[in-house]
Structure formats: structure tokens, C-alpha cells
Image (cartoon, grey):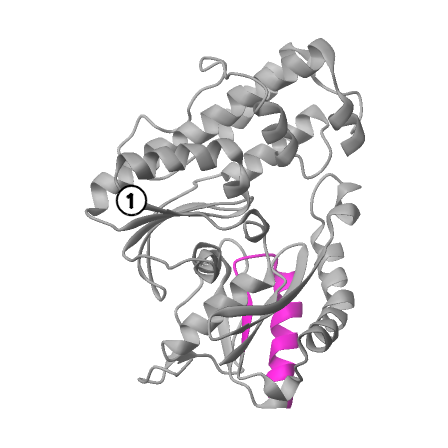
Amino acid sequence: MLTLGIETSCDETAVALVDGGHLLGEKLATQVDVHALFGGVVPEIASREHLRILPRLFRELMVETGKSPSDIDRIAVARGPGLLGSLLVGVSFAKGLSLATGAPLIGVNHLWAHLLVAGLAEDLHFPALGLLVSGGHTHIYLVRSPVDFELLGRTLDDAAGEAFDKVAKVLNFPYPGGRFIDMLAQESVPDKKMFPRPYIDNPTLDFSYSGLKTAFALHAAAHPELVFAEMVDSDAMESLEGDRRKALAKVCSSFNWSVTETLRIKVERALLTVGPVKSLIVAGGVAANSMLRETMRRVAAKNRLELTLPELSLCTDNGAMIAYAGWLFSKAGYSHGLELEPIPRGRVVPLDWVFSGDNIEE
């Protein structure tokens, strides 16, 4: 079953083809350079860029894989959560292609796709505990199967990835700044008393990072020598040296530790709550963070669980994750009609798909 995946939920435009659970090809265009001028994603610009780039990426994917639109059996599209204007571009393109080819649609929950994409490279073991850590979401799920997710905990305000972005912005690091925080953090031992571990003194599995973000802003205000006078570029970050690099490494390592520790505490609490699971899945853009990856390896080993981590290239938004999730959903007998609606961030993605009652052959 040849499945096309379309991803336009934020500022990455991506398409991919999956056949029988195997990735045939993918094309991705990033808008980082465009939005770096503003220090963050501008929704109107993002949607216009998707509109400009998506048709070209689709044509290039067809040429590079030697496929034609008539070969496509299923069209999977990220339907949310995300930026509404951006989602509308992808969903509209998918509907037009569905009408033109007759291939059925399947709307994909962008968050579920992040947690499933590692299945392209290794077997997924269910039931699993899923930790999704991205710029917009910090969620813990009990994943019973590729089509059965139970949300156990979520961020109440700022997500972990958003906290990284805001800290980098305070320091005037290049956008997106999370990778530079991670780069410097690897050069220092964290000061575990520098920043609080937010929202852990409670019995819930929810997260809150607004207080930690405020604590960092206050620390930066008290230590202005840490902050660049204006946003620097990647070359300046790479060539940074001396006492300033050491001081920034210490503060980045300490902040990174505080974020990672809250994730570890909540994950271990969730493992005690949900009962036996076979694996721990960690996904999303922040899953590329080296400290988080190492911490979750220790958690998995301590609890004798399989640890599932996507390749670094699959941690950020991509078309492969949408195509693979769409293939799994279609294989289980689910589809959508042309009434499929995009779901913006802040709203729950509904399970409004149609179940045929029959599993579809690969």
C-alpha cells in the first residue's frame, strides 16, 4: 500500500512515500532562515511558504521515486494540532489530490505521528509509555497500539521546547536556539541549584515550564554579561571561547538539567501509575537533546524497558512520520472523507475517522 504523507503543521514543508511500512523517499523544505529574522515562526509567512513550496516538493518526490500520482493508494495528511493557516494548505492539497486520483484520505494526529515514526527503523513494542517533547507540546501517553493513545499528562502552559526557545532568545542565540543550548551544555557539569525543577511537588503527570522560564530571565537580568547585545549567528556561537563560553556552558547545562529532570520525574511517576509496559518511546524535536536522550536511556534500563528513540533527522517535523502513521492507520482499516477538517493548536484532535471493519493488506 503506497501511502503519501504531507506535513505542513508549522514551518516545515514535507512530503514522503511509504510502501509496506518502508520509506521510499522524502522531500523537506525548512523555513528556518525566513523566520530567524523575527526570532520565531510568523504564522502568515509560514502558510504562504507552504503554499509556494508544497506543489514543487510533491513533483520532485514523484520524479525521484519513479512514481506517479495514480500509483498512490492512500493520502495521509497532518490535520493538527498546529498553525491553522499552515494546516489548511496541506489539508487542501491532500483533498485536491484525493479528488484527482481517487485515493482515500487519512487525517493524522501530528503528535501521534511523532511517537510512531521510529517504527520505520525498528519494531515498536506495545503497550508503551510515550513521552512527546516538542516546541508546542509536552505530553505523556499510554500507547496501547498505533491507534489507541491515552493522554496521561500534558503541559499546562509553556512546553519544554518553547522554554528552550525562549531561553535562547533571552541570550540572543541564533534561531532556533535549542541546539546551541545543547551544544554548550555538553561542555559543563550542571549546577543543580541554579534553577528550580518546576511543578514536581504534586501527584500529577502534568508539566509547567513558565516558572522556570521566568527564573532564567531573572538570572540573565542579574548576569548581563551572559547576554549578547544582539542576535548572533551560528559562526559566532561555534567560535565563542574563553570565560564567556565557560559561563554560558554552565548556565545552559544547568537549565538543560532542570528541564530534563522534570521529564524524568514525571516519566518514572507515570511508569508507576500505568502498570506494566513493554517500552518507552521518546519523540519530538526536543528528543534530539543529548542530555534527554541519555537520561531516558537510564530510565529505560532501570525499569527494564525497550527504549525507542527516532533518528535525529526524524525528531523534528517531517513527511515520513505522517506517511508512516497514515500507513498504520489505513492498514488498521481507518480513513476520512473530504469533510476532514484541520485542527489548530489548543483543540483536541477528534477521532472522527471511519472504520471499515477490515484490515487492509500491506
Can residue 112 be spotted in the picture? yes
- Image quadrant for the C terminus? bottom left
Q: Residue at x 69, y 77 (%)?
A: 62
Secondary structure of the magenta portion, mostly?
helix
Counting the numbered discs, the total is 1
Q: Helix, strand or loop at disc 1?
A: loop
Which corner quadrant of the image does residue 100 belong to?
Answer: bottom right
Q: Residue 86's spot in the image, x, y percent? A: 65, 62
Q: Residue 256's spot in the image, x, y percent? A: 52, 27
Closer to the camera in the image, 108 or 257 = 257
Residue bearing mark 1: 305
Q: Is residue 309 above or below residue 83?
A: above
Q: Is residue 278 above or below residue 327?
A: above
Magenta-tinted stretch = 75-100
Q: Is residue 203 above or below residue 112?
A: above
| View extreme (left): residue | 275
Closer to the camera in the image, 189 or 38 = 189
Can residue 204 be spotted in the picture? no
Q: Residue 238's spot in the image, x, y percent? A: 74, 27
Closer to the camera in the image, 201 or 276 = 276
Which corner quadrant of the image does residue 148 belong to?
Answer: bottom left
Which corner quadrant of the image does residue 71 belong to?
Answer: bottom right
Q: Is residue 146 above or below residue 335?
A: above
Q: Residue at x 54, y 49 (%)?
A: 315
Q: Is residue 90 left or right of residue 207?
A: right
Q: Residue at x 57, y 24 (%)?
A: 185
Q: Amino acid at mark 1?
A: Leu
- Dot 1, how many residues are within 10 Å of its Cα: few (below 14), some (14-19), or many (20+)? some
Q: Was residue 91 drawn as part of the magenta stretch in this picture?
A: yes
Q: Residue 300's spot in the image, x, y percent? A: 32, 39
